[in-house]
Image: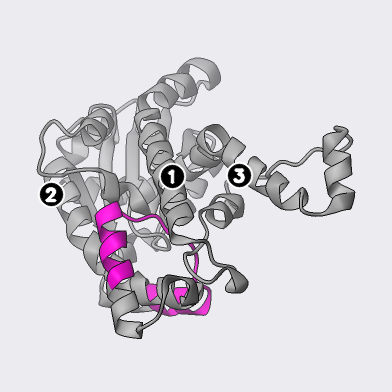
Amino acid sequence: MLYNSAADWRSAPHKRAVIFAMSGLGKTHVSNLLRGSGNWFHYSIDYRIGTRYMGEFIADNAKREAMKVPFLRDLLMSDSIFIGSNITFDNLTPVSTYLGKPGDPDKGGVEIEEYRRRQAQFERAERQALLDTPYFIDRAEALYGYPHFVCDTGGSICEWVDPSDPADPILKALSDVALMVWIKGDEAHTEELIRRFDQAPKPMAYQPAFLDGAWRAYLDEQGCAEAEVDPDAFIRWTYAKALAHRQPLYKAMAAKWGVTVEASDVATVRDEADFDAVIAAALK
């Protein structure tokens, strides 16, 4: 690791961290706090995905829907209007909307083959966005003069890496330039994440094998055809299984490639000094 002790971290002129965890455990909150200090560059993987690697897919999908409306079609064909996504650090809805949810189109679902295609597009995009981290570390310092750097990853980072492989290209690229930090939640956090997701289910990205297994199991359990699947019901059913699937992957990533901090400790972070203290404690 770049920092082998609390002293190394505290005395480092350039602090660099890659934060990973399930969505909802504080990655973006802490990253925004650090950015607000004026000393940290905040690199959002989801923002990079939406603006650099999937922006065209997202815009084309919106145009495809607009082309179904004769009034909008005429304006688009004459270049009289422009359609694009307004992605920000705090509004990544265009990415999740494009990913969609599999199931009955009449209930807002996407046919499973199209859903798989979009999942594959997202996987390629996230892999590349993660590998862009060293470039942004150099860019943040050379172009903007930021001494410190935080990478705010998506919850699906664990889907594309093999923590047991010492040559894993993504984990090696990240750990070579930054400290990998896992925000670990407890059972109460898991229950709260499930409760929140149940109230407002959101699209997610999955390993292809996990998705295929979950899809087949859901169809068998419900006794329904693919076109009859309620999209929200499926992703609610899948969410708890996804959490259980990801937890050991995160744990292995932290054990072999970085450090672990408790979500309860991260929740106490109010400024740069608090974050330094939490990381230093994890390095002891």
Q: Amino acid at mark 1?
A: Phe
Tell me the CA gap for discs 1 and 3. Answer: 11 Å
Marks 2/3: CA distance?
36 Å
Amino acid at dot 3? Ile
Residue highlighted by disc 3: 58
The image position of residue 123, as x and y in percent, is 38, 43
Residue position marked by numbered label 2 in the rendering: 255
Kind of element beneath mark 2: helix
Label 1: few (<14), some or many (≥20) within 10 Å? many
Residue 81, placed above or below residue 207? above
Give the residue type at disc 2: Ala
Pointer 1: what residue?
Answer: 122
Q: Secondary structure at mark 1?
A: helix
Name the element at disc 3: helix
Quadrant housing the N terminus = top left
Q: Which residues are magenta?
A: 193-216
Residue shown at the point (54%, 67%) measured from the top left: 109
